[in-house]
C-alpha cells in the first residue's frame, strides 16, 4: 500500500450560529497518498472547503466546532492539536492556496517579504538566505524578473501572476500536502490552464500531494488521480478518476457528469439536476440526495446508506448498491467521450 | 514627487484664496456692524469708527485692500481688542492651544489605537465590552460635563490638582485628560471597526496558513491595513484639536485660541474671524497634505509614482 500522508476519519464539523447549528460536514472520510492528487468535487456549500480548512484548523472556533472524527497527518493524530502545534505544521508540512488571488495577498506588504516570512518562521536561516530562496521560488513559478518582482506589491500583478505568487508562498517550505481551494475559479480560462499546469509540474518536481477543491469537472480531469464527490456535507462517492468518470455508481455523480457541457454539441439544452441541496440546519435523516434523485426508493428517505466497496478503492454511499435494489445503468462520460481528456494528455 | 508637491501647492493656494474670498463676502452679509453691540455708542460714533477702519468704503475696494495685506502676511487689526493685530493674537494664543492639543493627542493616539486593537482581538469578550462602553461614554458625554466632573473629583474633593488656569505642568493635567478622553474614544471606535474589517480579510487567512503566530499576524498583517481609515480622519482631527476647543478652554480658563472662534463671530470682529478662518484653513490644507503623504507610506496602492 502507498504511504498515506493524510487521513480523515468520520469528520463532523459544525458552525454555531444564532439561527442554530449548521452541520457543514457530517461524517467525511478521506485519505491522500504520497505524491497523488485528490480532487474534492461538489457544488457550493457542500462542505468541501470546510473539510479542508478544518484539517489546517483555519476556521475560527467559535463559531466553528469540530464535533467528532479523527485527522491523521503522516500517521500522527493531529485532531486535537493546539493552534501553537498547528503553527509548526502550517506552511511547513501542509499549506494552502485560496480561491481569490486578488484578496489573498496582503496589499501593503511586498510580495517577496510575504514569501520570505514563511521561510523565516519555519527554518533557521538568515534573512538574506530567505530572500534568496524566495527569489528562486518566484523564478520556479514563472514570475519574470524575480529579483525585481521581489520588491513589488500585489497590486502590481495580474490575477494569474498573484496566484503564482500564492503558489510560490505555499510551496516554498516544501510541504507534504498542498490544499488548493478552488485555485482557478477566479481566473480566466487560459490562465486557469496555466495555473493547473504549474501545480501539476511542481507537484511532480517536489513530490507534494495535492488536494484540489473544485466544482469544475474540467479541472478535475486535468489534474486528479483520485476523486471524492461530496454532497451536503458527506462524501457520496470516491475512487480513481477514471472509475468516477466512466463508471459512476452514485446518481449524484452521474448527474454532475451529465450536466457537464461537451465540446462540439450545439442546440442541445444542458442537462441539470432539478432541485436544491438540503438545509444543513436540519439535515435529512436518510440520504441527503434522495429528494433530487431519479432513482429514489423508500429506504433512501429513511436511513443513510452505508459504504459499498468496489474494486480499486472505489466506494459508493448509495442504496442502489444494495443487493436487493433494482439495477440501473447510470450514464457516465462513456457516451460522449470527446472532452475532457484525462490526465496524461495535457 | 517634486512635481506632485508643486501641483498640491498650487491647488492649496487656490483653495485658501477661495476660502478667504467666500468668507470675506459671507461675513459682510451678516446684519449689523462690529460697533453696534456696544449699546453706549451713538450712531455718529459708530459711523466714525467704521470710517476709521475703512469699513465705509465700497466692499470690493475693502476686499482688494484686505487681499493685498494678506499677501504680505498682514491680517489687520482686531476690531475688538484695541491696538492688537490679528497676527499677534494668534501668535500669543495658538501655542497654548497647540500645546494642550499635542499633549492630548500624545495620550489619546497610542491608547486609543491600542484599545481598538485589543477590543477587536477579544471581540465579544469582557475586554471588548469594557472598551466599547468606555468608548461610547467618551463619545457621548459632552466635554463640559467631563471637564466639570474631573474638576469636581480631582480639584475640589481630592484637592490634588488645580481647578483651572494654565501655569504649571500640574495645571495642564485635567484639561489634557478631559480632551484626550473624547479623542481616545473616537480613535478606539474607528480602530476597532477597522480591525474587525481587516480580520475577516482573506490575506489574514493566508498569513495564518503560512504558520505565522497570532502576534505576528496582528502586528505585520492587520494593524498596518487597519490604520488606513484612521489616517483619513487624522488630518481634520489633529487640526481641530490643535486649534483649540472652545468648551474645554472656557471651563479650565485657558487663554487659548478656541475662545476667539466663537467670540469673534458673535462680536462681528471681521478681521479676527477672517484671520482665524484663513489660519485654520491653511493648517487643515497642510495637515491633509501630510496625511496624503502618510497614506502613500502605509498603502503602496496609492503611492505617488516618481
Image (spheres, coloured by chain):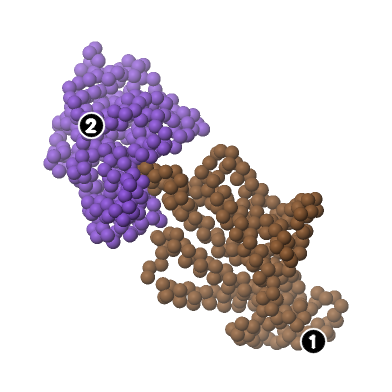
Chain colours: A purple, B brown
Residue beneath the point at 24% across and 60% down = A145
Label 1 with label 2: CB-CB less than 8 Å? no
**Residue A69, above or below B95:** above
Residue furthest toward the right? B40
Residue A328 figure quarter: top left
Label 2, residues with CA under 10 Å away: few <14, some 14-19, many ≥20: many
Q: Residue at x 44, y 43 (%)?
A: B214
Residue A330 visible in the current orientation: no
User: Where does label 2 land, which residue?
Assistant: A33
List the residue tagged with mark 1: B48
The answer to whether A55 appears left or right of A328 in the picture is right
Q: Position of residue A269 (x, y in %)?
A: 24, 37
Point out residue A44 in the picture as x, y percentages from the top left corner. 34, 36
Residues under labels 1 and 2: Cα distance? 100 Å
Label 2 chain ID: A
Residue B186 is left or right of residue A313, and the answer is: right
Q: Residue at x 79, y 78 (%)?
A: B35
Query: x%, y% of residue B56?
Result: 73, 86
Left or right: A17, with A212 as reference point: right
Residue B132 got which mark? none
Amino acid at each position: 500500500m502507498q504511504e498515506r500522508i493524510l487521513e480523515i476519519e468520520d469528520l463532523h464539523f459544525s458552525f454555531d450560529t444564532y439561527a442554530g447549528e449548521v452541520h457543514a460536514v457530517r461524517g467525511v472520510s478521506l485519505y491522500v497518498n504520497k505524491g497523488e492528487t485528490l480532487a474534492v468535487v461538489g457544488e457550493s456549500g457542500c462542505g468541501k472547503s470546510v473539510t479542508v480548512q478544518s484539517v489546517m484548523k483555519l476556521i475560527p472556533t467559535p463559531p466553528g466546532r469540530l464535533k467528532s472524527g479523527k485527522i491523521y497527518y503522516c500517521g500522527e493524530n493531529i485532531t486535537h492539536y493546539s493552534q501553537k502545534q498547528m503553527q509548526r505544521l502550517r506552511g511547513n508540512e501542509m499549506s494552502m492556496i485560496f480561491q481569490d488571488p486578488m484578496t489573498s495577498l496582503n496589499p501593503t506588504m511586498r510580495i517577496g517579504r510575504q514569501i520570505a516570512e514563511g521561510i523565516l518562521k519555519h527554518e533557521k536561516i538568515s534573512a538574506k538566505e530567505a530572500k534568496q530562496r524566495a527569489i528562486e521560488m518566484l523564478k520556479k513559478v514563472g514570475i519574470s524578473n524575480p529579483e525585481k518582482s521581489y520588491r513589488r506589491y500585489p497590486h502590481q500583478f495580474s490575477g494569474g501572476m498573484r496566484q503564482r505568487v500564492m503558489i510560490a508562498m505555499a510551496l516554498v517550505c516544501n510541504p507534504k500536502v498542498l490544499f488548493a481551494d478552488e485555485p482557478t475559479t477566479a481566473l480566466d480560462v487560459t490562465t486557469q490552464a496555466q495555473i493547473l499546469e504549474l501545480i501539476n509540474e511542481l507537484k511532480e518536481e517536489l513530490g507534494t500531494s495535492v488536494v484540489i477543491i473544485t466544482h469544475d469537472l474540467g479541472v478535475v480531469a486535468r489534474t486528479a488521480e483520485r476523486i471524492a464527490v461530496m454532497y451536503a456535507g458527506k462524501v457520496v462517492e470516491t475512487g480513481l478518476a477514471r472509475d468516477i468518470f466512466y463508471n459512476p455508481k452514485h446518481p449524484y455523480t452521474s448527474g454532475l457528469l451529465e450536466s457537464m457541457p461537451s465540446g462540439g454539441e450545439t442546440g442541445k439544452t444542458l442537462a441539470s439536476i432539478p432541485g436544491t441541496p438540503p438545509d444543513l440546519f436540519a439535515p435529512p435523516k436518510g440520504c441527503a440526495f434522495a429528494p433530487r434523485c431519479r432513482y429514489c426508493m423508500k429506504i433512501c428517505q429513511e436511513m443513510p446508506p452505508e459504504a459499498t466497496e468496489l474494486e480499486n478503492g472505489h466506494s459508493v454511499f448509495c442504496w442502489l448498491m444494495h443487493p436487493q435494489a433494482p439495477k440501473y445503468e447510470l450514464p457516465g462520460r462513456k457516451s460522449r467521450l470527446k472532452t475532457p481528456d484525462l490526465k496524461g494528455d495535457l | 514627487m517634486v512635481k506632485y508637491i508643486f501641483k498640491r501647492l498650487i491647488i492649496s493656494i487656490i483653495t485658501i484664496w477661495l476660502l478667504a474670498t467666500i468668507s470675506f463676502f459671507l461675513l459682510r452679509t451678516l446684519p449689523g456692524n462690529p460697533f453696534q453691540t456696544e449699546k453706549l455708542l451713538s450712531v455718529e460714533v459708530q459711523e466714525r469708527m467704521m470710517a476709521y477702519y475703512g469699513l465705509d468704503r465700497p466692499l470690493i475696494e475693502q476686499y482688494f485692500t484686505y487681499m493685498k495685506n494678506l499677501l504680505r502676511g498682514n491680517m489687520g487689526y482686531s476690531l475688538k481688542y484695541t491696538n492688537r493685530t490679528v497676527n499677534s493674537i494668534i501668535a500669543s494664543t495658538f501655542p497654548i492651544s497647540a500645546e494642550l492639543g499635542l499633549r492630548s493627542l500624545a495620550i489619546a493616539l497610542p491608547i486609543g489605537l491600542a484599545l481598538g486593537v485589543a477590543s477587536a482581538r477579544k471581540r465579544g469578550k469582557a475586554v471588548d465590552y469594557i472598551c466599547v462602553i468606555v468608548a461610547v461614554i467618551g463619545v457621548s458625554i459632552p466635554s463640559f460635563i467631563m471637564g466639570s466632573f474631573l474638576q469636581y473629583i480631582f480639584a475640589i474633593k481630592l484637592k490634588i490638582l488645580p481647578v483651572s488656569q494654565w501655569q504649571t505642568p500640574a495645571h495642564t493635567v485635567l484639561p489634557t485628560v478631559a480632551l484626550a478622553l473624547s479623542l481616545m474614544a473616537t480613535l478606539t471606535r474607528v480602530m476597532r471597526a477597522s480591525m474587525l474589517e481587516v480580520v475577516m480579510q482573506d490575506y489574514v487567512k493566508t498569513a495564518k496558513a503560512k504558520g505565522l503566530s497570532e502576534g505576528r499576524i496582528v502586528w505585520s498583517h492587520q494593524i498596518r491595513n487597519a490604520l488606513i481609515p484612521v489616517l483619513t480622519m487624522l488630518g481634520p482631527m489633529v487640526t481641530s484639536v490643535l486649534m483649540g476647543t472652545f468648551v474645554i478652554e472656557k471651563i479650565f480658563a485657558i487663554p487659548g485660541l478656541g475662545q476667539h472662534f466663537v467670540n469673534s463671530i458673535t462680536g462681528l470682529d471681521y478681521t479676527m474671524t477672517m484671520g482665524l478662518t484663513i489660519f485654520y484653513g491653511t493648517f487643515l490644507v497642510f495637515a491633509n497634505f501630510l496625511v496624503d503623504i502618510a497614506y502613500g507610506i502605509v498603502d503602496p496602492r496609492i503611492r505617488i509614482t516618481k
